[in-house]
Image (cartoon, helix red, strand yellow):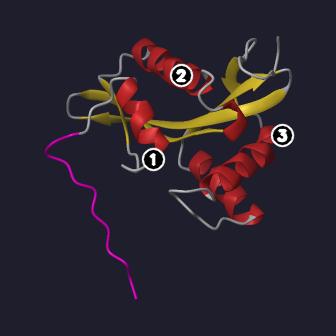
Amino acid sequence: MGIGKMMIDNVKIRKAKKEDLNKVSEIFRIEFAKSPYNEKWIRSSSLNRIKEYLKKGSDVFVAESNKKILGFVIVESFLWDDGRVYFIDEVVVKKEFQAKGVGNLLINFIEKLAKKNRAKRIELMAVKDSYAFKFYNKLKFNQLKNFVYLTKKLK
């Protein structure tokens, strides 16, 4: 069926190539401009953000069908006191492919990768009012009771 109206098949998850980075950063820029994020990325800064993830050692994997990138996941792996942890920095799916299984494929891919590398857990952060938060809950990610993400604006 390919990229179609309701279902998407032939989706493959693969490591992003250098030539994918512009498309990945464009998806990032467009999707994060929408509510509830309302972020104001420009082309150059979104591309630099993706490159920054790569510089710090994160991996970028894309979901692709018929040579079109539908979405991506950015993940890093690190050692903690109880073993290896995979931290999902970003999961972004183009609006027209959301709720069609692409996000599930990306998360399942990372779960398999983490298990293969004997990771103890997968962690991520999400905005409570976002579709992503509900999506992660459906995939059995739980909100930690004893962890609060804090921020301070600098003047």
Q: Does the magenta stretch include residue 150?
A: yes
Q: Is the magenta stretch mostly helix, strand or loop?
A: loop
Disc 2, disc 3: CB below 8 Å? no
Q: Which residue lies furthest to the front in this view?
A: 5
Q: Residue 19 carries which label?
A: 3
Is 50 situated above or below 69?
Answer: below
**Image quadrant containing the N terminus:** top right
Of mark 2 and mark 1, the one earlier in the sequence is: 2
Q: Mark 2 points at which residue?
A: 104
Q: How far apart are marks 1 and 3 (CA)?
A: 30 Å
Q: Mark 1 points at which residue?
A: 130
Q: In this view, does 38 lie to the left or right of 71?
A: left
Residue 76, given in percent of the width and then of the height, sits at 47, 37
**Image quadrant containing the C terminus:** bottom left
Is 16 situated above or below 110?
Answer: below
Residue 20, given in percent of the width and then of the height, sits at 79, 39
Q: What stretch is highlighted in magenta?
A: 144-155
Q: At 33% across and 29% down in the image, what residue appears? A: 141
Who is closer to the viewer here, 123 or 33? 33
Of mark 2 and mark 3, the one earlier in the sequence is: 3
